[in-house]
Image (spheres, coloured by chain):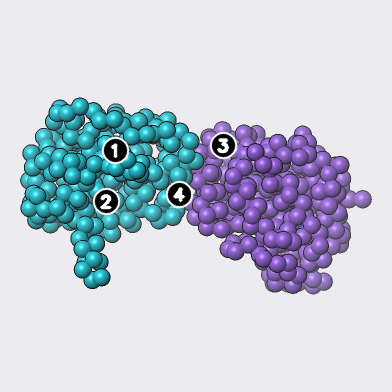
Amino acid sequence: MTAHPAPGVLRAALAWLDAHREHFRPPPDAADRADPNTAVKPLGELAQLMAAVLRRTDPADPAHATARGLLDHAWAASGDGALFHALASAEPHASYPLELYAGFADAGFRHAAFEDLARVTTGTRSWRAGEREPTRALAVLRAEHRLGLAPDHPVAPVTARTWLGGLPEPWAFEQAAGYAATHHVFHVTAWGARPEALPADLAAYLTAWLPAWLGTCLEERLWDLAGELLAVAACLPEPLHAHAEWRAYAAAQGPDGRFVPHGEAPPAPADDAAEFRLCCHPTLVAAFAAALARGGSGGEGGDPAPRAGATVGGAR
Amino acid sequence: MSDASGAASVLPDAVQNIAAVVASALAGGGSRSSASPGPEAAPETAAAVSGPLAAAVERTPDDPVLVAAARVLGADVLAPALLLGTPPDPDDVALATAARDAYPPGADATAVTAWSHWGLDAALRTLTGDGLPGTAPDAGWTADEPWPRLAFRLSQLASLALPGVDSALATAAVKRPVDLARGFVRAVRRRDWAQAAGLGRWLALVPGVPPSLGLPNGLAFVHHLGGASDARVGLHVRAARTLLEAAP
């Protein structure tokens, strides 16, 4: 059997992310911008997924140091968290500053003034009554939990309302449902840190149907969603190894380490801002999925025991 | 060239016509309790249920196109008798016999060709009690194929998904229900309705299919989206429903 492709995918994806780290830096007026999806969302995803990479790599592994460097860069780019306080001050009843901040909190970074404000806003009846899509509601509640907020609000009633929580007919899978399903798993398992948090019926459901979803996404060259599904495969209490699927996925990685969201694999390196916006999410996902898969792959490095709940590093 | 292409469409058309008649017979002979809206409710084919297939498709019993089409459909020309337990029309038995004898598989036949011929022969033996079992083709591949390939190949042999006709293929299907169900999911996602319908029929026959698949709704879904353009989809969905209704 050939070596598992995940370590190579991880190395190359991290190299591309590291080479493009300045693109994650929010514009100076980010807190006033209308569209946080382009201005600050990539920074939050960088923090969330690098926190997971850090947790799943051995400190002696160069990938660990790269993830550490990217996390420190991201925190510094947020003005040591001041960005989230500014965002929350501008839109105090919006949930996205909290969701972004939670990724940093996972990596041990904290901003006291932001958390003070979040304690106030999340304690309102308005916050509880906020109209959110079910998977988004789950994301918000899990973010609150990571900050020690809303401890009396369990996740089960929220997970029951998502697409995946309904144990849907697997042949009804399509892209939007697929992203809802992957994020359900990421939130419930704390981005792979607590596979045991996945209920047994859901684990059995995913063990049965994930291969079919993953296979069709690879056939359709939907690399971004395929990467997320490979990450889900590694989040299961009994991870699916998916060796052949990993080989097909790895073949779509560009020579500079990036993934395009879908379609032809990139033939040559590219360095412009538009290409960054296109590739930053699928490439972050690739690093995340590869770091999770290494543990169950028998590949190099082995699996450092997950340190559930531990803060790793933190603000220095 | 025009002659060749004209002739080339005659056989597929005949296969479609016979499949529609068989599907209609299965619909008419099964339990009528469940509401089943959809394209299968076409009254003009429902009227042609009784009587031999040749008459229903307006061909003479010895029409070579009819015999060839029967060979393509394999055991499914006898599906109403096999699935509903009704006596087969003697003319249909004669047609199936002619199809079996006219097209023996060669030494280099594909698994699909060899198994569909074996299935036709086994169906005839089951209904008539005549003849000795032929040597079954190789089924070793069913143990090793990855699930997408296994599912695709078995979907092409869904005419062997029959109660009372045991085969190494049926045994293999019983061993891999989750893999076949994954194939159904993949086929629906690819909008490969023929593959989905064939797999749905196997899944209706074998135990161990995860209930979360939602097979009855899946069959209805496939029938609505794929049944209008391919009568074999309707045939397999009808057969699957009959199998599900007969299941304990």
Chain of the residue displaying label 2: B
Is B121 displayed left or right of A103 in the figure? left
Residue B134: give x, y in percent of width and height.
25, 30
* Residues packed near mark 1 inside 10 Å, few (<14), some (14 to 19) or many (20 plus): many
Q: Amino acid at mark 4?
A: Arg
Badges 1 and 4, same chain: yes
> Dividing the picture into quarters, in which one does residue A61 lie?
top right
Q: Quadrant of residue B210?
A: top left
* CA gap, disc 2 and disc 3: 36 Å
Discs 3 and 4 carry the same chain letter: no
For marks 2 and 1, the one nearer the N-term is 1
Question: Which mark is on residue A203?
Answer: 3
Q: Residue furthest right?
A: A316
Is A278 located above or below residue A46 in the figure?
Answer: below
Q: Can you tell which of label 3 and label 4 is closer to the viewer? A: 4
Q: Check contact, mark 2 vs mark 1: CB within 8 A.
A: no
Question: Disc 2 residue type?
Answer: Arg
Tell me the SS state at disc 1: helix
Q: Position of residue B144 (x, y in %)?
A: 48, 36
Amino acid type, mark 3: Ala
